[in-house]
Image: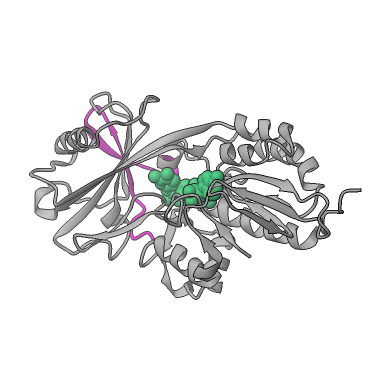
Amino acid sequence: MVLLEASSRLGGQILTEHVADCLLEHGAEGFVAHSPALHEVCGRLGLATEVISQTVSRALVAEDGVLREVPPGEAGRRLGIQARPADWGRGLQSLRRGMGSLVAALAAAIGQDRIRLTTPVEAVEPADGRPSGGWLVHSGAGTSFEADGVIVALPATAAGTVFQAVDPAAAHTLQRLGTVSTLSVTLVVDKDHVRHPLDATGIVVEDTAAPAGLRACSFASSKWAGRAPSNRCVLRAFYRPPAGGVGDPEPWVERTQHYLERIIGLKGDALYTRVVSWPTAIPRYASDHEAVLAAALAPLQRLGRVALAGASVARSGLDGAVRSGYAAAEAILQAGSRAPAQ
Ligand SMILES: Cc1cc2nc3c(=O)[nH]c(=O)nc-3n(C[C@H](O)[C@H](O)[C@H](O)COP(=O)(O)OP(=O)(O)OC[C@H]3O[C@@H](n4cnc5c(N)ncnc54)[C@H](O)[C@@H]3O)c2cc1C
């Protein structure tokens, strides 16, 4: 088994940072609380005792500069988070040392010698004429890999590209799936510099006075225990950025600070800030998403030992990504080898 990753780090939309004595999540911060798939993978990696639950469940909404509490589940619904209905209002769980500890444990379980970073996959095609009847995986780094089976766990557009030659119809369906971009602005601040007690998970922003694109602000260090020392807090704003890109990070920090001054009484300079942009990261799921994908991918999968995984194929964030990973591995193990070409 070999894992090919385009970027210079593992984790994709999981990005945990330890800085200013705080634990910061710039991508996914947790997973839906009752996810059997996450509990299974954490258990197998020895992380079961690391699983933590949210310390608060109270959520706030900002309207016309005023904060008010909303019922459980309402915040996610207002934000349009595309979770499965069973997940509404049940909160998230995370890992004590951050979601990055899941990535580190997975990498250790796979083994560094089986991981190739900065190795983007460009195409996957049947290895016709080869006795194995397997697959050839071509990477942009100029190397090709032979494999008995392939799991493609890529964003839908990238998955479409790698299957372009072997199944243009499946590629077309994958590339037409919609996505939205998101931008995360994290501030580490002195607790004394915030007037509000931050006794909630955060704020859903539906405020005409808010900066354009601001959707929510999470009180990360209130939501999770152990994320900051007692004299600091971690605030995290989420924007839907404009289509043309996000540009310079500093204005995003300034407009976040300015709004939080008004809404929670934030004063003074932040001790640390970081802006992370996630272009076209979040899939948009139509109600028939799974059915459309299953139909489009069936001819491809009949070629044997090829499967897709990731948030593009199964909804509910990390839960969908891990769930689909297990399903893909199962499908590969059950499928026969691709019959060699006649
Ligand atoms: C800001 C933010 C906050 C979020 N918060 C949560 C949360 O709290 N809870 C939750 O459940 N979900 C959350 N999500 C969603 C969740 O992170 C994703 O659903 C999940 O990480 C998707 O995993 P994935 O493996 O499908 O894709 P990704 O994490 O995007 O991984 C895809 C990987 O493929 C690599 N790649 C791309 N092209 C190629 C190529 N051609 N060849 C090789 N490798 C390639 C990428 O570099 C990347 O490492 C959040 C997402 C964002 C952006």
Tell me which residue sits at (16%, 34%) in the image. Answer: 258
- Check residue 59 for magenta coloring: yes
Coordinates of residue 206 in the picture (x, y in percent):
32, 30
Part of the protein shown in magenta: 53-74
Colour option used = one colour
Total marks drawn?
Answer: 0
The image quadrant of residue 56 is: bottom left
Horizontal side of residue 291 vs 12, given as left or right: right
Question: Relative to residue 40, is residue 327 depicted above or below?
Answer: above
Confirm whether residue 314 shows in the render.
Answer: yes
Farthest right residue? Answer: 342
> Quick one: 248 or 14, which is closer to the camera?
248
- Check residue 68 for magenta coloring: yes
Coordinates of residue 169 in the picture (x, y in percent):
73, 31
Confirm whether residue 72 shows in the render.
Answer: no
> Quick one: 188 or 157, which is closer to the camera?
157
Horizontal side of residue 304 vs 307, given as left or right: right
Tell me which residue sits at (46%, 64%) in the image. Answer: 102
The quadrant of the rendering that contains the N terminus is bottom right
Question: Relative to residue 216, is residue 96 depicted above or below?
Answer: below
Question: Relative to residue 254, is residue 123 depicted above or below?
Answer: below
